Image (spheres, rainbow, N blue to C red):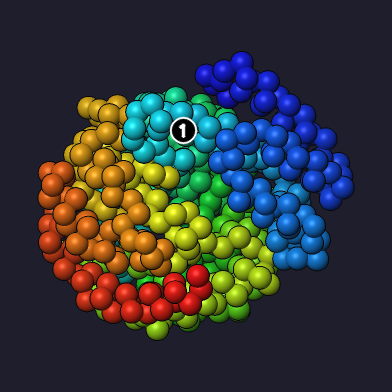
Amino acid sequence: MENKSIIETAEYFAIKQAIKYIEHEPEKNLNKLMDWADKFDKDNLYQSQRAVFHNVLEHPESNWYQLIMKVFQLDTGVRKTFIENFIINASLIGSRRQKKVRDKEQCNVPWAILLDPTSACNLHCTGCWAAEYGHNLNLDLNTIDSIIKQGKELGTYMYIYTGGEPMVRKSDLIKICEMHPDCEFLTFTNGTLIDEKFCQEMLRVKNFVPAISLEGFEKANDGRRGSGDFEIVKKAMALLKSHKLPFGISTCYTSANYKDISSEEYFDMIIDAGALFVWFFHYMPVGNDAVTDLLPTPEQRKTVYDRIRNMRNTKSIFSMDFQNDAEFVGGCIAGGRNYLHINAAGDVEPCVFIHYSNTNIHNSTLLDALKCPIFMAYHNGQPFNENMLRPCPMLENPECLSEMVKKSGAKSTDLQSPESVEHLCNKCIHYAKNWAEMADKLWNDNK
């Protein structure tokens, strides 16, 4: 880990020793590792998370405890690297550094940076916002390297690739893992380019994790992603599992597939396949040609809300619903509060779904981008709603995004078909109004 203070260096090696201690008898010594985490989280940045883990370790019969044990069945080198990079670097030490920069600079500093290595993709999925970008844009290796070096100075050690299909640039992704072995890299991928050779590369570098897109069972998935995709994804998951490699699932829920992706059968399928986590994303009507009929109704969104929360009590997989779980992270996490997005042209955007920007990484530093008008509008406006079931400045509070974009002077970053903020937000007004009644009732009932 680069650029550590003397204190950070001492803590780093102390926790590494604690991790080494539990490798042979994890069930016996995990509590000791948590004691170390308690000791080093001096600013209580992860107090609630630590409390959850302590509770899990007290209940070995729980689904969460079983999930932790699955982590200890992974390839030994990959597991050790994940714990060092994700828990020590990105979370314990990195978050402390992020807080110092936030306090000094009075701006948001992200825990994770999302970036698009390329806009190219070998699929064309219905309703995919990335399809609007075209296929001719790329962040070169030196630019990605510079972004990560700047990010580490701010305390950011978690990097997530979006696209396009990031795996189009397999060799560069592996090269970046080699250049920054102290960071953890995750990629959203359609899974079609995962093969034996790439699994061997993942085992070698140890700090690369795929999140494979799967939109439900075969009919729902292939209806959006193309005939045969479901079987290809199943083969990719089987390959990763056979090599004891960590991976997860990414799914976008819509009015068409919400029943599939929130069903017990779907959870069982991906758990049996070896997935350790599943991230659910609400469909966003981004792009001039976005299909608004795919927006879930309030009743459909509530079904997803109820089912996913129920599965958390019974299934051994980490699940996060990025639209319905805002209460756990204090609302909208975009605008650099927890993450930002850099597209394949270098535009620094507040959110992977909000394609407006004041600045480009090719002529700006990362810190300067975090201080640009659109990012400061996010910083000063968050949370955008006291009801954490209405967190987004676009989907549930479209008047907020419209105002921020206009006042900040941010421009559309879609080079293929620029979309005005009025056009985007007008698509959300009806949805926001309909969801508000349901959301307010849910929020008030569960307080």
Left or right: 73 with respect to 330? right
In the image, 365 versus 198, the foreground residue is 365
Compared to residue 229, the image places residue 111 above or below, namely: above
Residue lying furthest top in this view? Answer: 6
**Residue 228 picture location, percent across and down:** 46, 71
**Residue 145 picture location, percent across and down:** 41, 28
**Residue 112 picture location, percent across and down:** 45, 42
In the image, 261 versus 156, the foreground residue is 156
Compared to residue 46, the image places residue 277 above or below, namely: below
**Residue 105 picture location, percent across and down:** 34, 28
Compared to residue 229, the image places residue 304 above or below, namely: below
In the image, 303 versus 127, the foreground residue is 303
Quarter of the image for residue 289 reads: bottom left
Left or right: 80 with respect to 219? right
Query: Circle 1 — which element?
Result: helix
Residue 364 appears in the rendering: yes
The residue depicted at 64 percent of the width and 63 percent of the height is 317
Quarter of the image for residue 295 reads: bottom left
Amino acid at circle 1: Gln
Residue 286 appears in the rendering: no
Q: Quadrant of the N terminus?
A: top right
The residue depicted at 60 percent of the width and 78 percent of the height is 264
Would you name the residue on which mark 1 appears?
A: 98
Compared to residue 279, the image places residue 262 above or below, namely: below
Quarter of the image for residue 56 reads: bottom right
The residue depicted at 73 percent of the width and 26 percent of the height is 14
